[in-house]
């Protein structure tokens, strides 16, 4: 059974700092890994998707990496801003037709002005 | 492109009643997945529909059911509501092929009293 862990559960940083969020998974046989952000009481917003054959993806100030062999992914946020404050979740999809994505519990990020 | 829409956004029901939630995916997407999110259990997969067929199912009791229509819109039904069913119900739209990137709606907040 796939298990996804995100550490730390919460993180508070001053504005402008670069930071890394971690996502670990137990079964390396994945199809893709997707990072989301969720604002309180809202739905999830897709940030980056990494296919199992890829090593990293970039979008603006965000960079996500994937190391399947070690069961790890990281989300790097450059020059953090107060608007980045949210909960960040990673989700692992086991196969192309296996719709059951497994989510981590998320890291709640607070960026202080 | 219009995003994923979910209706209603908020719902208050009494124990024992039943409820139907609706999800309209992004135009052209054929896959709809449903998730339950609670503070204690995080995001848990309910089921996925692809081209009107249930393709995957999570570990929820039979009180939770769903269906998908020919226009890809999906409904989720919960019968005999229990207090523990109070949660944010999220649906995710995906092409169902290719990258399988998921796009989430804003959710339906269900409160059972």
Image (cartoon, coloured by chain):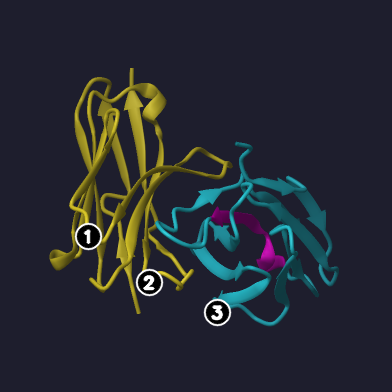
Q: Chain of mark 1?
A: A
Q: On the picture, is B69 further left or further right than B47? A: right
Mark 3 nearby-residue class (10 Å; few <14, some 14–19, many ≥20):
few
**Which residue corresponds to the image point at 71% horizontal and 71% vertical from the top-left?**
B66
Q: In front here: A3 or B87?
A: A3
Q: Chain of mark 2?
A: A
Q: On the picture, is B98 further left or further right than A6? A: right
**Residue A8 in the image, given as x and y percentages of width and height:** 26, 49
Read off the magenta span.
B83-94
Q: Nearer the viewer, mark 2 or mark 3?
A: 2
**Which residue corresponds to the image point at 58% horizontal and 42% vertical from the top-left?**
A41
Quickly name the residue at label 2. A95
**Which residue corresponds to the image point at 50% horizontal and 38% vertical from the top-left?**
A39
Say whether disc 1 or disc 2 marks the residue closer to the N-terminus: 1
Same chain for labels 3 and 1? Say yes or no: no
Chain B color in figure: cyan
Q: Secondary structure at mark 2?
A: loop
**Residue A65 in the image, given as x and y percentages of width and height:** 20, 48
Quickly name the residue at label 3. B59
């Amino acid at each position: 059974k796939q298990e996804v862990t995100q550490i730390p559960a919460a993180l508070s940083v001053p504005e402008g700092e670069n930071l890394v969020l971690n996502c670990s998974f137990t079964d390396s046989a994945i199809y893709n890994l997707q990072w989301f952000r969720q604002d309180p009481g809202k739905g999830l917003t897709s940030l980056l998707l990494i296919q199992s054959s890829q090593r990293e993806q970039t979008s603006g100030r965000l960079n996500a990496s994937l190391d399947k062999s070690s069961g790890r992914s990281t989300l790097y946020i450059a020059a953090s801003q107060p608007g980045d404050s949210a909960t960040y979740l990673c989700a692992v999809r086991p196969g192309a037709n296996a719709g059951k994505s497994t989510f981590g519990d998320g890291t709640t990020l607070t960026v202080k002005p | 492109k219009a995003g994923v829409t979910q209706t209603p956004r908020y719902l208050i029901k009494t124990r024992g009643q039943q409820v139907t939630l609706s999800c309209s995916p992004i135009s052209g997407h054929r896959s709809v997945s449903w998730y339950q999110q609670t503070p204690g259990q995080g995001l848990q997969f309910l089921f996925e529909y692809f081209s009107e067929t249930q393709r995957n199912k999570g570990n929820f009791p039979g009180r939770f059911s769903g269906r998908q229509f020919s226009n890809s819109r999906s409904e989720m039904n919960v019968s005999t509501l229990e207090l523990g069913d109070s949660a944010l119900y999220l649906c995710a739209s995906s092409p169902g092929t290719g990258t399988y990137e998921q796009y989430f709606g804003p959710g339906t907040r269900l409160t059972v009293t």
